[in-house]
Image (spheres, rainbow, N blue to C red):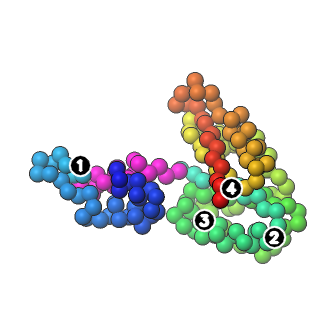
Amino acid sequence: MRETAAAQQGGSSRLTAVVGSPTTGSKASSSGGGIWSSDLAAADLVRQAVQVPGRIHLYWLVKSSAELQWCHSMLVGAADGPAKAILDVTIFITPEVDTSQMDPLPCRTQQKLHVGRPRWGPIFEGVKAEHPGCNIGVFLCGSNDVGAKLLKQARKRSDPPQAGSTGTSFCYFREHF
């Protein structure tokens, strides 16, 4: 388990080392009851321990053309990486933002571009309808005002605990830098 925790913290190169290395985790006892009986068992353990989301819905609120230029290249890198098949991007801009020079992101679906503020209630309901019975993480890197709205929607749109495994829950996480 120590290697699995290290894999989660160390990124994909460490994960590859745990899964692909013939020396890591392949020490089986002669009776076959060792901690790791094969690399396949190690790979299965890592897959079970490291939860990969089935879909990433990214909502990006852009207030200026400079902000769009600053962050767009990072989004292209993320959208062209391992998350490409599961990433959906929706961008909300103010009317002052110039998008004429913006190339589309290489995502699973075409990026959606809206002028104005997001209506969080329908967004949460749409995600909930698409992922019934799931635990959905809501992550914010942004203003406290937006955070308060997201927290309110996460609480409001989550099913009560009595719903059990059929209920959908939103868990809000605030990033601090």
Image coords of residue 64 (percent x, y): 82, 67
* Amino acid, disc 1: Ile
Q: Is residue 122 above or below residue 82?
A: above
Label located before the other in sequence (3 or 4): 3
Residue that badge 2 annotates: 65
Residue 102 in sight: no
Decide if residue 15 is on the left or right side of residue 160: left
Q: CA distance from mark 2 to mark 4?
A: 19 Å
Crowd band around label 1 with a 10 angstrom C-alpha radius: few (<14), some (14–19), many (20+): few
**Mark 1 falls on what kind of element?**
loop
Q: Which residues are magenta?
A: 38-53
Image coords of residue 163 (percent x, y): 58, 26
Label located before the other in sequence (1 or 4): 1
Residue that badge 1 annotates: 35
Q: Which residue is at 58% across, 68% downward? A: 80
Residue that badge 4 annotates: 141
Query: Residue 89's image quarter?
Result: bottom right
* Amino acid, disc 3: Ala
**Residue lying farthest bottom?**
101
**Foreground pick, 14 / 163:** 14
